[in-house]
């Protein structure tokens, strides 16, 4: 019996030793800040997109009528505030659409990166810069879209802290182009709302 009590006590001591660092990290419930401060462009980029956005996506596709549908972006800070992860969804006439994207400012290259994977099989890594306090312009990106080689150019404009106007111009190999525009509002939750 004494050996069993000693074994139980040893197990409890090990559990306390293993749990102590986790408990210490959650002292006040807030994530720890990085050891070195980030450049202001990192915070600016993350703050600009973090939150839940809802609005209309309008698609101009050659040979089809212009279509508008509800689009939602749910963007959360990641890596101790060094970037954002966005889950974007909507339902167009062709069915459900979704994409997951990472957004971050690269201090070394002084560039904004927006890397996305879509439900339509697209994988894009857009690179851009803040042109002014409210606008990110992305370089033209040659990539695949629906089995075709295209050149896509994106521009994001924030008229105010809770409004986004994202445009994507896609130049197709045959000389025609598609245009997608998302006009969204950041949804603010009331304090205490679940």
Image (cartoon, rainbow, N blue to C red):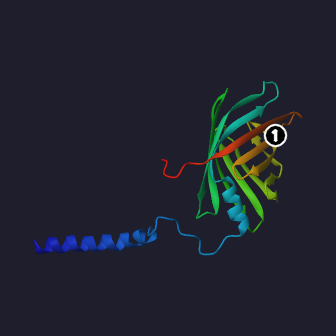
Instruction: Give the quarter of the image for residue 80.
Output: bottom right
> Is 14 situated left or right of 147 in this image?
left
At x 64% / y 63%, what residue is drawn?
Answer: 82
- Which element type, helix, strand or loop, lies under badge 1? strand
The N terminus - image quarter: bottom left
Q: Position of residue 76 (x, y in %)?
A: 59, 54
Q: Position of residue 7 (x, y in %)?
A: 20, 72
Farthest front residue? 191
| Mark 1 crowd level (few <14, some 14–19, many ≥20, 10 Å Cα) | many
Of 3 and 92, the residue lying toward us: 92
Q: Position of residue 71 (x, y in %)?
A: 66, 38
Q: Does residue 120 lie above or below 82 as drawn?
A: above
Q: Position of residue 114 (x, y in %)?
A: 71, 53
Of 44 and 22, the residue lying toward us: 44
At x 63% / y 56%, what residue is drawn?
Answer: 84
At x 49% / y 48%, what residue is drawn?
Answer: 193
> Is 189 situated left or right of 138 in this image?
left
Instruction: Give the quarter of the image for residue 60.
Output: top right
Residue on which disc 1 sits: 170
Farthest right residue? 175
């Amino acid at each position: 019996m004494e050996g069993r009590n000693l074994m139980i006590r040893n197990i409890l001591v090990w559990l306390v030793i293993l749990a102590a660092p986790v408990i210490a990290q959650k002292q006040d419930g807030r994530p720890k800040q990085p050891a070195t401060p980030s450049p202001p462009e990192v915070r600016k980029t993350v703050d600009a997109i973090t939150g839940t956005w809802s609005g209309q996506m309008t698609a101009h596709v050659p040979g089809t009528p212009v279509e508008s549908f509800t689009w939602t972006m749910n963007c959360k800070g990641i890596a101790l505030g060094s970037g954002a992860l966005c889950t974007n969804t909507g339902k167009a006439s062709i069915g459900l659409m979704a994409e997951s994207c990472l957004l971050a400012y690269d201090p070394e290259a002084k560039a904004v990166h927006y890397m996305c994977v879509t439900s339509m099989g697209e994988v894009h890594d857009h690179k851009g810069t803040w042109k002014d306090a409210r606008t990110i312009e992305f370089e033209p990106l040659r990539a695949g879209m629906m089995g075709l080689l295209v050149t896509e150019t994106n521009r994001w404009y924030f008229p105010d802290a809770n409004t986004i106007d994202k445009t994507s111009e896609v130049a197709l190999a045959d000389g025609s182009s598609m245009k997608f525009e998302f006009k969204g509002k950041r949804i603010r939750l009331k304090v205490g709302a679940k």
